[in-house]
Image: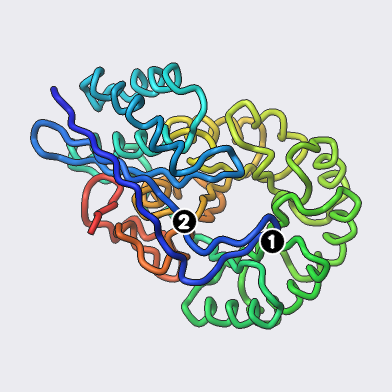
Amino acid sequence: MSLETSIERRSLPLERPFTISRGTTAETEVVIVRIEDDDGTVGVGAAGPASHYGETAATVEAVLPDLLAVVEDVGDPAQLARIEWRMRETIGRNPAARTAVSIALHDLEAKRLDVPLYRYWGLDPSATLESSYTIGLDDTETMREKTADAVEAGYGTLKVKLGTDRDVEIVRTIRSAAPDARLFVDANEAWTPREAVETIDRLAEYDLAFVEQPVPAGDPEGLKFVFERSSVAIAADESCVTLEDVPRIADRCDVANLKLMKCGGLREAWRMIHAARAHGLEVMLGCMIESNASIAAACHLAPALDYADLDGALLLDDDPVDGVPMPGGRIDLEALDRPGTGAVPE
């Protein structure tokens, strides 16, 4: 079988600037990959690289030709394991680039079998989740307005970015604007261990599901210090990048936050889910600010998760790719009426 491949780099503006403790983003760059078989069936995937993990759209573009050469050399999209290991041997890092190819291959193979991806994996589409919708950092009144807009739009699970000198004020304001919402908060490594413990103690009264990445990833003992003293569950994100990290965080948090763009593909994400379960951790799948070309694939993992934070495409002003229906953040796999991941470029 011969396979034809193509790469397209797109710059996508956000609906509004998005701020976390590390900075502000007004647009994101994604790299869309297409893999087409002899019958004209096309698999679509994408990379949503993050400079925090050493990748940009330019680095993705630079390595994708080598990765796609592996796909073309193998020639059989069903040989997912073989292609995965060959790609890893060819490009050891660059997980977002490898993820783009992984998603496109899974999309193609599920389409060739004429099944949605969740069925290819044997998952129950009714056992789905509601993704959180993220409220980025801003002045407190603007964050209140964003929250009110999200609640009016039907979002029942909100994730609030923290890492300021007014974090308690922010959460108090958000909770007053969304009294019935399930709340996650995310410090993005902004606190010292002692600051984290003190802040979490003050935030506990606002009924938080968990606090994500309270301390820098380079301080594993600090994470353990917070975990052992926190009155709220702790999730690890920046501290949980690859499969090898799962056992390292197992006694330092309650929730492992996985991301396709961190780990390098769908098969690796599955391994991380199983490893986290084996270590007694709950599992969340998060995302970068991405297109539905990659978010759609992540949505199919929802039945295997405890939490989903897959709002990356919802934050865009205009996504060139349609994906899995997500009314009010609910990942509605049962409403998907097409095979593969459900990603359909314009």
Residue at image location 72% in from the left, 79% down from the top: 173
Q: Is residue 76 above or below residue 143?
A: above
Rendering quarter of residue 177 = bottom right
Q: Which tag, 2 or 1, sits closer to the chain's start?
A: 2
Location of mark 1 (residue):
185
What kind of residue is marked 1? Val
CA distance for labels 2 and 1 = 23 Å
Q: Is residue 208 above or below residue 234?
A: below
- Amino acid type indicated by mark 2: Thr
- Few, some or many residues within 10 Å of mark 2 (<14, 14–19, 20+): many
Disc 2 target residue: 28
Q: Quadrant of residue 248?
A: top right
Q: Which mark is residue 37?
A: none
- Give the quadrant of the C terminus: bottom left
Q: Position of residue 92 (x, y in %)?
A: 50, 22
- For image coordinates 78% across by 68% down, the residue present is 167
Horizontal side of residue 248 vs 256, given as left or right: right
Q: Secondary structure at mark 2?
A: strand
